[in-house]
Image (spheres, coloured by chain):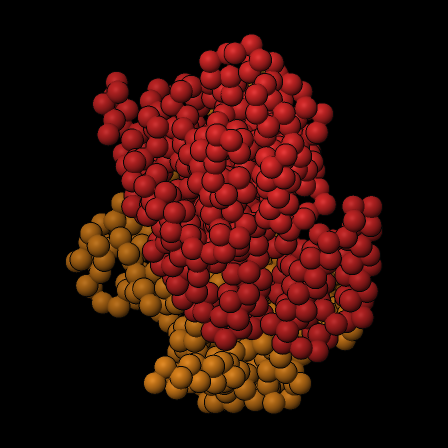
Chain colours: A orange, B red
Amino acid sequence: MKKIALVCIVCSFLLAGCWDERLYKELTIVPLIGYDGKPGEWMGYFTHTSIDSEDTVSYTTVEGSGISIEDARLNASRKTSESLDPSQILAVLLTEEAVRWDLVETFDVAYRMPRSRLSSKLAVVEGEMAPYMEKTEKMGLEPPNYYDKILATAAYHSIIPDVDIQQAARYILDDGVDLDLPYLKISEITGTPEVAGVALFSGKVFSGHVLDMRESTIVQVLKKKPGKFTVFSYEWENEGVKYPVTVELDRYKKQWEIQKDKIDVTYDVKLDITSFPADHLDEKKRRRELEQFLSKKLTQDFNKVMGKLQEAKSDPIGFGRVARAFHPELWNKGEWPETFSQLDIQVKVKAVITRTGIID
Amino acid sequence: MEEVKSNDSLILYIQNLFHDSADLVVHEVSWKNEISIVCFYNTMTDSADVNRQIEILRQRSIDDFPKWEGTAASSVGAFSESQLIENVTHGFVAVFFPSTNLLMTITIPTFEVRATAEPDNELVIRGSHEGFVESIDKNISLIRKHLSIPDLVVKDLRIGKETNTKVTYVYIESIADKEVIDIVKTRLENIDTPKVYSIGQIEDYLEDTVWSPFPQLLTTERPDRVVANILEGKVAVFMDQSPSALLGPVNFFSFYQTPDDFNGRVFVGSFFRILRLFSFLIAIFLPSFYIAVVGFHSEILPYELGVKVKTAIQFIPYRPIIEAMIVELFIEVIREATIRLPAPIGPTIGIVGGLVIGDAIVNAGLVSNLMVVIVAMTAISSFVVPSVEMNTTIRLIRFPFMLAATFFGFLGIAIGTLILFIHMMNRSSLNQPYLSPIVPFDPSRFKEVFFRTPYYKNNQQQKTFTFRAGKRKDGEGT
């Protein structure tokens, strides 16, 4: 009996390759994926590494099509020497067409398979997918690293939300808050893809509305999820001369007053002056003037963005969550995107200068 | 005339007893009113010394001292053949008085003993630089020098019918556990083997589980280490002609402590103690972790690292286990070779083996440079442990882990770790738990595994195995 058991154990060792072994040598790293299409007709662009000799790594893109994104990957896998491994994706790009369908359903495989990387970045691109997968001269880096870096930089500067595949699902499944994804487009001047703002989602799908960089920065501030570094610039006029003023957001408080048919939003922002050639900020009067000017400008801009959000029926700020929790009469009025778009939302920004950057 | 004749035949008889050995000296010595036969090995005892001693004794007998035979170096007893043989083989001088049938023993053996030098395998930076030598008496004297107390007890017994080897165990009566001493005593007395020539044999008899890869007795050649340990209630076992002492009962963590911890500062000692325990984990798990990652779980690598790993292994013609085995075995071979080589050539072979072949093997594409890095880190980590036996054990048990990782990935490592810890928990050293402060858990001594606490806090005698001894409340410890 002992002998038989021993033989069985020893023989089972020979079967090692038969279960879930996946030699890293036999996998291809796919750091960048682009998807285009609609349910049933997905087209996938997979940028994968190919190691030619001891230390040169080059990147090639293969296309695959299928009825789902997983099917497209398997289809593309047949065209490469090694199987495409989606576990080290840095960024996933989606065309505007691709986000018109429920993202959670599209990315079902990512949430289901343990090998999928849920922390890869998501972005929506303008127009066709193919040009985004090609390396341009201005990129400086290989496309996968380039997208990873520019998305990280934009998130650092509060331009876009820091959203990965996992968080995207959270926002999509939450009725009280909508998703906004980074929006990329190819620059007309350089011909290189760059961050242009955010794409607004309404409900589970892309609303078709896009905010530019300045507006999307305001959205991140409204959400109270800014990056490390948030800057606003305005032109200040005094006695007929225009001076640029650049302020950095230091810290701020938000206050939402949600009533039956109206929301009053107040943001108390503390600002650091990083550039102000007119100077004389040591004078109380000058500071007061500047604070009033900034409050006015910021209030204007914030309200403008709020209007755009309402127009897009997209609530990335999450008023819906608060309404759902504390104001059921408002929440139960109807579908939240509709309710939100018709609400009277007034934003008020109170700016206070905390640091002038000059030692008196 | 008749008496002389019988003495001649007696001399012949004694010579026969020792098979006419060339270094045996048997001759007559005349005393005041009798004649005796002196018998000794001149290789073990200096003949001039013998003459001097006999001269002193003869003068005492002429002066009619009562009990003139008994001096500091001599004693007298009834003659028996076995006693004669024992005395002579131990290097004593046997003086036989045929007329009275008495046997006088003069103990003036002069063995060649090398000078006490610091043991090469247990170097310390600060602290005593003495080491044991191949003489049991000298070794005991080195300990007595540290501990001038009557509580230090030395017991000896002889083992092995053919080798008749002297084995000594040393402990401090007031501190050592009675139970432990009894175990050592019974186990030593029960050794039933004709030949004992190395301390490793005694270790086998003393250990609780010989078939465990983990050493259950601490071997040391340092007197300061023995003293520190017997002061914690341990027993030290010495064998004649061996410079090593066996210390027991020990726990696993004793192997990771060195006199340097206690000679250094508190922070430094603690830091290096933690570092050593950490290196234990690296030495066992690093190669298997690597194998599991490249064989099963490559998804845990971040992209940047993944590309580096992939470039390194892309053109290696074998599976990771074979690659790992090649480098691991290669390093073991270099290590084994450098031990046997004479000191001037050793480092050369190390450089040739390590650098030249290591570099060439990577350039030839037989092994990835990542694997060389991992194996080198593992090898260095395994040498951090201050005990040679534990070092060999660690190097050995990483091979099963590598196999487990090849077959089952992280699951294999997890199951292997489970088995390893179950095995360690079940071990004991002289019937004391091997993983002592952790299993069974003793919070008072637990911190001492990782930290070297300041001395002035230990106002009570610290024992290795006394449970909850740390609740020191004015001598109230149990």
B377 and B142: which is toward the camera = B142
Quadrant of the rendered image containing residue B420: bottom left
- The quadrant of the rendering that contains the N terminus of chain A is bottom left
Residue at 61 percent of width and 89 percent of height = A78
Residue at the spot 60% in from the left edge and 37% down from the top edge: B2
Can you give x and y, in whole percent of width and height, for residue B90 in the image?
57, 38
Identify which residue, A298 or B425, lies in the foreground: B425
Question: Residue B69: percent from the left, percent from the top?
Answer: 51, 21
Q: Is residue B172 visible?
A: yes
For residue A236, say whether it is visible: no
In the image: residue B47, left or right of residue B77: right
Q: Is residue B312 left or right of residue A327?
A: right
Q: Looking at the rendering, in which quadrant would you find the C terminus of chain A?
A: top right
In the rendered image, the vertical position of residue B438 relative to residue B205, given as above or below: above
Q: Quadrant of residue B6?
A: top right
Report which quarter residue B357 is drawn in.
bottom right
- The residue depicted at 62 percent of the width and 49 percent of the height is B16
